[in-house]
Amino acid sequence: MKTYDHKKIENKWQKDWDKKRIYRTLDSSQKPKYYVLDMFPYLSGEGLHVGHPKGYIATDVISRMKRMQGANVMHPMGFDAFGLPAENYALKTKTNPAVSIPKNVIRFKKQLEILGFDYDWSREVNTTDPKFYKWTQWIFLKLLEKGLAYESYEPINWCPSCKTGLANEDVEDGKCERCGTVVEQKPMRQWVLRITDYAERLLKDLDSLDWPLSIKESQKNWIGKSEGSEIEFPVKNLKDKIKVFTTRADTIFGATYVVLAPEHELINKLKKQISNWGEVEKYIKLVKTKTNIERTAEEKTKTGVLLKGVKAINPANNEEIPVWIADYVLASYGTGAVMAVPAHDERDFEFAKKYNLPIKDVVIPIRIDEKNPPQPGKETVFRNIILAVIKNPKTGKYLVLETKKPRWTTFVIGGIEGNEDSETAARREIYEETGYKNLKLVRILGGPIHSEFYAGHKGENRIAHNTCMYFELENEEHDSLAPEEAEKHEVAWIDFKDITRDRMSHSELDIVLARLNTNNDCFTDDGILINSGKFNEMTSKEARKKITEFVGGKMVTKYKLRDWVFSRQRYWGEPIPVLHDGDKIVPIKEKDLPVILPRVKSYEPTGTGESPLANIPSWVNVKVGKGKNAKIMKRETNTMPQWAGSSWYYLRYMDPKNDKALVDKKKEKYWNQVDFYVGGAEHATRHLIYARFWHKFLYDIGVVSTLEPFKKLQSVGLIIGEDGRKMSKRFGNIVNPDDIVKTYGADTLRLYEMFMGPFDQTAVWNTDSIIGSRRFLEKVWKIGMKITTQKQINSSRFTLKGSDTTKNLSVSASFQTLLHKTIKKVSEDIESMSFNTAVSAMMVLVNEMLARQSPDDGGEKSEISKNDFKMFLQILSPFAPHITEELWNLLGERQSINKSTWPKWDEKKIIEEEIKIAVQVNGKVRAEIMISRDMQEDEVKKIALNNKNIITWIENKTTKRIIYVPGRIVNIVV
RNA sequence: GCCCAGGUGGCGGAACGGUAGACGCGAUAGACUCAAAAUCUAUUGAUGGCAACAUCAUGAGAGUUCAAGUCUCUCCCUGGGCACCA
């Protein structure tokens, strides 16, 4: 018997597939198309580790299965290499990227090839190839033409180490995503893409995508839509107005001051009025020196300066309110100014506490008593009431009243009478209802609560504004109750844990308890308005519109998403295809594309805000026109960011060699969307948002016919090192796939990576565990060898006559069941990306096959038929294409196994005649019984009740109920 | 702080509300071997018992249900996204 020599087999078949070009994809077919795509690798120069191929293996499994299931599959691969990481690596190693990238491509391709992927290499793309980036530049020209690319001089994120401007997406925690340096804000000329024009569509169309929830959620967060109002606060005695943005126009009556961002343009205009200008100027300077990180790091301590001599008018009630500047208000969001409502905004609350600014409640929570709701047709009475929570600090218990009729447990509650303030009312009620005299008011528990209920004893509906207070006993001295009070209720002391909604009759109990616990009186939810003039009693939602209208504001939508800073002051990128004629921008003509990135000796970034390309006069200066009209224009020297090429590369695979168009219309229509896209979740708010933006733009200009590029997306979980850290040279924990392939074979590696755990979860690499996958393949090989060498045993043995027929039949039949169950499971699991359970199911099947072949079994009675084994090879082949191809070939097949038809499972064979079910007594499993599938319920129950074990459990007890779930379980309740 | 995933043996992980721990690694014992490796066979959640079996176990606590790892609520922890976004 030949041993399993993975090197020989894998080498042989990889050559054969290549020679026969079996994975070439045609651009039209009778078959349904299926476009499955990997996020193409980025060649920074760093080596490959075992984590990288995980996603590629998965798409390979899927594409192989889909092909066998009759689809015209496109599974292409290419390379991305422009941008910062590749250039930084080149600088570090002092090799020109233009030289090193092609070498990396070759090396990388080799590493992919030994894993046996089914890529159609005739479609390979490379973003640094002028034939490719011609079209990247073409898209830029179109964006420019449509007004979606523009020059800006706004301050942007600048990485002092990479010496380039960065997009918001390239900044993580205030640091450069590449090198970890803290970014600065630097005003400079830059190219920007108007992605914000697409914000709404990018947000809305997420709904149509079959993407992981977490990625959709990230994008939603990143786009950050909020709907609110823009309202103007006039400056007293001046024509100027402060425009604020707020989502809570309903709280405007509680706006007790206004805050401007320190960068706000109005501050300079008001210079004359500001009597403390020196202080103000100092503060603004201080803020400027802080980076964004520092500004947010000092989280809880807000700072600001009052603009003395300036007052704003609250347009809702015409009150004069102070104006502050503070760096907790951002210039870049909204209007750079806010109306501060400390009672209903945490930040304003904190600021107001620190600087002693007035806090005014204008929105209060609503509770409608669900146990005792208002009755229709009854009169409604309004009351201001108090609720007193009273604790005895000595015992830790709380005072409640237990009323006799109706039987309620309540805190001390009562109406506020006449001109009483709420504390006086509370103390009076406490004395009247409990007799206690000496209490300390610890605090008022926030603003009032609006509650609605039916007051049964009075036969009327009540609306109450309930002010809650927290008292502690100073001592236990108390008078006895007046007889008429004692008749109504008893006083009781209970533990805190017993204060529950079940026991207490207050529908607002949750709020009371929350306020008792947190010591935070800032109510930020929606509710009902008070202290708001004619808007009192209105709900927040309604009031937002009405008040905005009332104060002459307008409803607007804002996004956190910023326009995409698209230029880099670096060498290694696509040149931005425009000329500068003085201040005028002259786009390069389409026919003159591509603008080729010149080869240079020195490509160190300059740090001046210009790219190193600016140092090549022969390239920068371009003569335009002829004769007298000729003039010299200057080329744009900034280049495009890393993300440009990857924003559209998936379209180029459809038509990689076209030099007339980005993609041929017919081919684009045929391939349509990417059906399935697999890659890392780290691209959620970069690549995946940029690509969607460009795709939508290309749709708008008629280049593509679909609204979204990637129909279904799946993220790959990382593979981390054995030490639990990310694989990195720094930690010396990198495992190289080449080594694993050498020792165990590509099929083993593929199988292992699919078996490691749920595909989308992070998995820890464990070289010890690979042996399991290898052993599995060894078993497959062993069975295969036996079958190829044994005399043909065909399925006719099922009809053998003789004494052992019945027995054989039952054994074989159950093997058939297992085989078909496995086919079903593997087919479904691949579809749902549950590769680990698919592999496990095949392991079970192989163990069973092996048991049937074991010598002490007599061999003959249960051997596996050639046909059955071939079906198994077919379902294994997407995972382990080489070994299955070899065995397939040895079994006499001439065509590649990947050209064969995916086996179908037979539902009839999956149904088992005899099944084992559990019998429970009171939900605990006490026995197992064998029943036949079509047995009647009564019969099953009878068997269950007569089971020896069961009898001991139900003896001397009465059976209340018997539940039978067909084919699953019997539960006897006694 | 807000939003999204998760928390199951020594480890990776299985489990349409229906027998928790499939499958794999590791470990223990045995077979083969001069020996080792490889391979094969058996055992392997914990506790008690010779055993049949029993009790306890899915981050903690409550609840719904004939039945909860799975559903509901509260809390704790881990990972990820956003973050003075008004």
Image (cartoon, coloured by chain):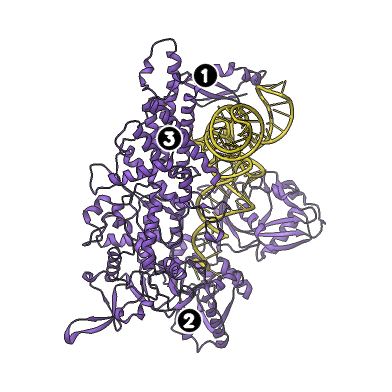
Across and down, in percent, residue A555 comes to: 41, 66
Looking at the image, is A498 positioned above or below residue A929? below
Disc 3: which chain?
A
**Local secondary structure at mark 2:** loop
Measured as percent of width and height from the top left, residue B32 is found at 59, 28
Rendered location of residue A370, percent (x, y)? 56, 47
The residue wearing badge 3 is: A825
State which tag comes first along the sequence, 3 or 1: 3
Judge the density around disc 3: few (<14), some (14-19), many (≥20) Cα neighbours within 10 Å.
Answer: some
**Quadrant that contains the C terminus of chain A:** top right
Visual hue assigned to chain A = purple
* Quadrant assignment, res A5: top left
Can I make out residue A758 in this image?
yes
Q: Nearer the viewer, residue A449 or A564?
A: A564
Residue under label 2, please give it. A235
Which chain identifier belongs to the yellow chain?
Answer: B
**Residue drawn at (50%, 44%) of the image:** A756
Label 2 CA crowd tier, 10 Å (few <14, some 14–19, many 20+) = many
Q: Nearer the viewer, mark 2 or mark 3?
A: 3
Q: Which residue is mark 1?
A: A940
The secondary element bearing badge 1 is classed as helix
Whether discs 2 and 1 lie on one chain: the answer is yes
Name the side, left or right, on which A966 lies relative to A909.
right
Could you tell me if residue A547 is visible in this image? no
Q: Is label 3 or label 1 in front?
A: 3
Distance Cα–Cα, label 2 vs label 1: 85 Å
Q: Position of residue A817 (x, y in %)?
A: 43, 26
In front: label 2 or label 1: 1
Q: Chain of mark 2?
A: A
Q: Earlier in the sequence, mark 2 or mark 1?
A: 2
Disc on the earlier residue, 2 or 3 = 2
Disc 2 versus disc 3: distance between alpha carbons? Answer: 71 Å
